[in-house]
């Protein structure tokens, strides 16, 4: 969690550095003006020149510190202490020059008017450049104004004919006004930065929530994949059972032949070939199961053969469709590659094939019990076109099918998340999954996938 107070102090200190650069240049100008003009002083002129040179050096050091701080976007504790010291020395130097000038001029004449005008300007400027911290503003104001007030009081009592009382009142009023300005200016600035900090905190929370949602989405995709495995387990068991039966029969035959000492070479080779084919078939099924159930959603996408994806997918669900009496019509697969998570693309395909097979469960016309997978591509996208026979989806249902938890199968047979998750997967791939109501007289879904590296944004669809 972000520390609001620390961030606020850091922002205010950085603002001192940003605003202080311009003020520092003005202080150098004042020091150089004092060095060359001297306010008509004679007695204190050498001191004024020495202090002016000192001020130029101090202010240049301050500017260098500010630039360093702005470049790395923050003060260290040591740098902040150094900045406070330099600002204080600036105030002492400015105050000394103005005090020596006022003392020698006995607070009268044109030169004193010039000095007073500069004093007012410097005091006013500090409201903008130093009003973020009382430790900077109040000492700066005090060091500039109070020595002048002291001199006024001194001359008030030492020169009977001069009444400096209005000037004393004026200086005190100006000092109080500056303190009020300090409080108002700082309050407004703190409010502004507080809003900024709150916005940063909200952005951080949104970023954290985004990571949580992404993690939950990955888990949901994997859970959905396992749910499909569970729903199709009967077909998978049957698919493995067939080669197991062949293995068992061939093994028994070879065993009988061995016992009867009638091992004919051709017969042995025939049965061992059956064994090899059956083992290879089971191995392929198990490999497909392992591939499909693997939780690799956070692994970077890679270039994958479309032919290999289709092979893994159809191998996985072929027996399930056969057991339901559904024909799978597979068009020739183009020899192309796409940048994807192959397991996730398989999941989208299997979700569509599973939904299509469920829709055909109660189809009585044998010539309507089919599912087709066709392909098309243009310069930018590759299209998987999955259609099925039977009655076409009605328009009122087609508008809702991608909504999470919407299902026509009943809660005991479906979660209503398959199509929603599949659509999320395709958006993550820079493509889209959509229902094509304009495609012939059958229920048709289209998977649209970029041929190149995808932009992970929403992609508009068109009929294929």
Image: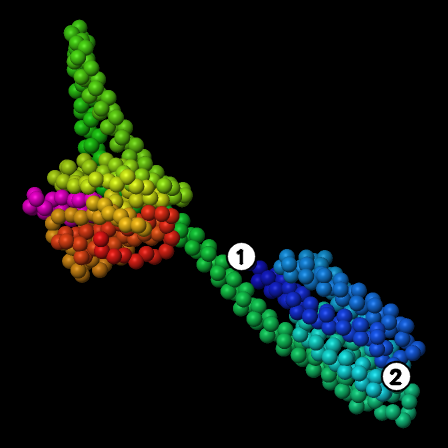
Residue at screen point 25% across, 28% down: 282
Task: Kindly indicate whether the residue at mark 2 contacts the one at mark 1 (C-beta within 8 angstroms).
Answer: no
Residue at screen point 70% across, 82% down: 177
In the rendered view, does 237 fall on the left or right side of 182? left
Residue 190 location, x and y as percent?
60, 70
Q: Quadrant of residue 406?
A: bottom left
Residue at screen point 19% across, 10% down: 265
In the image, residue 233 above or below residue 247:
below
**Mark 2 Cα shell of 10 Å, populated few (<14), some (14-19), many (≥20):** some
In the rendered view, does 67 fall on the left or right side of 160? left
Give the residue number, with chain letter if any, for mark 1.
1
Give the residue number, with chain letter if any, for mark 2.
105
In magenta, the rendered stretch is: 353-373
- Name the residue at the right extreme: 43
In the rendered view, does 19 fall on the left or right side of 321? right
Residue at screen point 22% across, 48% down: 385
**Mark 1 Cα shell of 10 Å, populated few (<14), some (14-19), many (≥20):** few
Lower position in the chain sequence, tag 1 or tag 2: 1
Residue 331 location, x and y as percent?
19, 41
Q: Is residue 23 visible?
A: yes
Which numbered circle lies on residue 324? none
């Amino acid at each position: 969690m972000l520390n609001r107070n620390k961030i606020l102090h850091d922002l205010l200190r950085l603002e001192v550095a940003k605003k202080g650069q311009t003020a520092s240049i003005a202080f150098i100008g004042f020091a150089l003006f004092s060095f060359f003009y001297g306010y008509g002083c004679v007695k204190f002129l050498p001191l004024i020149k020495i202090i002016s040179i000192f001020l130029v050096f101090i202010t240049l050091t301050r500017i260098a510190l500010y630039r360093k701080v702005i470049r790395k976007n923050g003060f260290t504790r040591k740098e902040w202490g150094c900045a406070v010291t330099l600002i204080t020395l600036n105030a002492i130097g400015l105050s000394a020059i103005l005090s020596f000038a006022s003392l020698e001029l006995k607070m009268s004449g044109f030169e004193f008017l010039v000095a007073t005008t500069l004093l007012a300007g410097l005091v006013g400027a500090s409201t903008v450049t130093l009003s973020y911290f009382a430790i900077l503003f109040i000492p700066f104001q005090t060091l500039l104004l109070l020595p002048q007030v002291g001199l006024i009081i001194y001359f008030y009592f030492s020169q009977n004919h001069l009444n400096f009382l209005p000037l004393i009142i004026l200086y005190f009023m100006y000092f109080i006004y500056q303190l009020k300005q300090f409080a108002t200016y700082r309050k407004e600035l703190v409010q502004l930065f507080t809003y900024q900090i709150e916005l940063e905190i909200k952005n951080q929370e949104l970023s954290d929530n985004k990571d949580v949602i992404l993690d939950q989405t990955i888990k949901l995709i994997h859970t959905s994949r396992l749910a499909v495995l569970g729903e199709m387990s009967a077909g998978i068991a049957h698919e493995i059972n067939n080669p197991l039966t062949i293995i068992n029969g061939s093994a028994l035959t070879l065993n009988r032949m061995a016992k009867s000492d009638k091992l004919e070479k051709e017969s042995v080779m025939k049965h061992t070939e059956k064994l090899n084919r059956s083992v290879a078939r089971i191995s392929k099924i198990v490999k497909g199961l392992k591939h499909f159930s693997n939780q690799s959603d956070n692994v970077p996408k890679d270039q994958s053969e479309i032919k290999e994806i289709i092979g893994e997918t159809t191998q996985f669900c072929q027996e399930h469709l056969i057991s339901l009496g559904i024909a799978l019509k597979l068009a020739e697969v183009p020899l192309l590659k796409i940048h994807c998570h192959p397991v996730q693309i398989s999941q989208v395909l299997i979700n569509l094939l599973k939904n299509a097979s469920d829709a055909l469960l109660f189809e009585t016309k044998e010539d309507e019990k089919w599912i087709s997978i066709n392909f098309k591509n243009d310069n930018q996208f590759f299209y998987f076109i999955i259609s099925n026979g039977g009655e076409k989806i009605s328009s009122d249902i087609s508008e809702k099918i991608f909504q999470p938890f919407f299902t026509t199968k009943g809660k005991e047979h479906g979660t209503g998340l398959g199509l929603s998750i599949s659509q999320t997967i395709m958006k993550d791939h820079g493509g889209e999954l959509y229902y094509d109501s304009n495609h012939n007289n059958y229920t048709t879904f289209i998977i649209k996938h970029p041929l190149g590296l995808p932009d992970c944004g929403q992609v508009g669809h068109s009929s294929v």
